Image (tube, grey):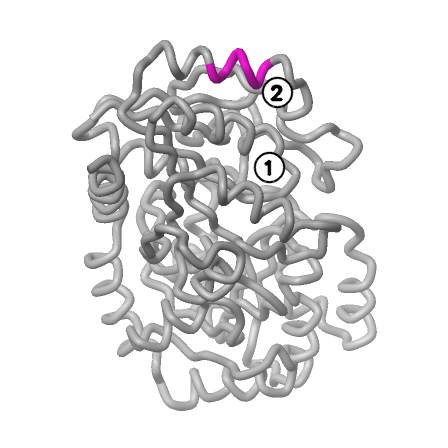
Amino acid sequence: MKIAFLSVFYPYRGGIAQFNAQLYKALVRKHNVTAYNFIRLYPKLIFPGKSQFVSPDDDAERIETIRILDAINPITYNRTILKILDEKPDFLLIQYWNPIVAPCLGYIAGKIKSKNIITLSIIANIKSHESIPFDQLVTKWYINRNDGIIILAEASKKELLKLKPDVKYIIHPHPNYSHFGARMNKIEARNMLGIPIEKKVLLYFGFIRHYKGLDILLEAFSGLSDDYYLIIAGECYGSFDKYQKIIDSKNLRRRIFLQLEYLKDSQISPYFSSADVCVLPYRSATQSGIVGIAYHFGLPVIATDVGGLREVIEPFDTGIIVEKPESNLLKNAIVSFFQQNLADRFIVNVNKFAERYNWDTLAEEIINFAEKLKK
């Protein structure tokens, strides 16, 4: 099939661009795929991080794209539409992740759909993690401009059907990321980072934002013995001050490895390879690409019971679900993980999950969905 794939790709950084790169590679193995990318995504004034782009020396997946769309320049919307129509695709695939990009992507989706070209969207988060005015109205408008929706967690189903009860959709769990290199020997990885060999090591990985609950993890960690060690790796969106206050007030600094910069793909392996378990203390979530990275490195997960995290952990016996995002409950789960020696069992099941849900199966389901909608 001939596919137009519109979203964010290299040189933009972050989980959405990484997701799109892996899906593109799976699709292009059997189909003719043209990737359409942004010239400009977020205005600098509203972007909370240090940069929207990977560094020049980053070895991120360099997908060949047509950079044509400016999220805040409507002139480029019609230019993008004409370019896609000129290619005569069998269907348009879009990854939608934030109401801020709804005007440009929704306008394009509706216009392409009106030309009798099937238009599908992957929507990672039906509901925003951090409240945005009118976000549900905007997302509802966006959904209505598509022929079908792909969601990545069963937990999104209720929210999706609330916005559009008759929506056509499929569900496929977030596949494991596979482009970060192989898992290293644990001792070598810890030596590389300067992490004590004998410690029980927890990993918090990814952008630091309020809804991701690093403060909850720090409070839980403060109640653990000196046998435990914590890696925090990820750029902070906003101020790190409130987390630093917890670290200082609880005298935790000597037991924490802090890496508050965005990591290149080639730098990630030592962090996951050093850890015994990845901890997701989220206050809210739909699904998480961090689970996909952890599973790639054969790492079990301890996560709070929010969004779709339970459904990619509990049924597969790959980690522990904490009923609420509360520090004491999280602390108890961490202690149980080590006291009951659960790692070996979970690791076996993590590897089974990776075999079952991968980028090729996601690509195949999207193709089948598009073909079904064309009939």
| Residue at the image point whose x is 31% and y is 48% from the top | 182
Helix, strand or loop at label 1? It is helix
Q: Is residue 76 among the parts visible in the rendering?
A: yes
Q: In this picture, is 268 found above or below 356?
A: above
Q: Nearer the viewer, mark 1 or mark 2?
A: 1
The amino acid type, in three-letter code, at marker 1 is Ala
Q: Is residue 209 left or right of residue 365?
A: right
Determine if the magenta segment contains residue 215: no
The amino acid type, in three-letter code, at marker 2 is Asp
| Residue at the image point whose x is 52% and y is 64% from the top | 203
Which residue range is magenta in the image? 76-81
Where is the N terminus found, in terms of image quarters? top left
Magenta-drawn stretch, dominant element (helix, strand or loop): helix
Q: In this picture, is 194 found above or below 279?
A: above
Percent of width and height locating residue 162: 52, 62
Name the residue nearer the viewer: 112 or 21: 112
Q: Is residue 104 left or right of residue 158?
A: right
Percent of width and height locating residue 265: 45, 39
Where is the C terminus found, in terms of image quarters? top left
Residue 102, disc:
1
User: Counting residues from the N terminus, which is met first, the one under dot 1 or under dot 2?
Assistant: 2
Q: In this picture, is 93 found above or below 212?
A: above
Name the residue nearer the viewer: 239 or 321: 321
Q: Which quarter of the figure has residue 52?
A: top right
Name the residue nearer the viewer: 121 or 61: 121
| Residue at the image point whose x is 53% and y is 56% from the top | 163
CB atoms at circles 1 and 2 under 8 Å apart?
Answer: no
Helix, strand or loop at label 2? It is strand
Alpha carbon separation for disc pair 1 and 2: 12 Å
The residue wearing badge 2 is: 70
Percent of width and height locating residue 139: 58, 47
| Residue at the image point whose x is 43% and y is 39% from the top | 146
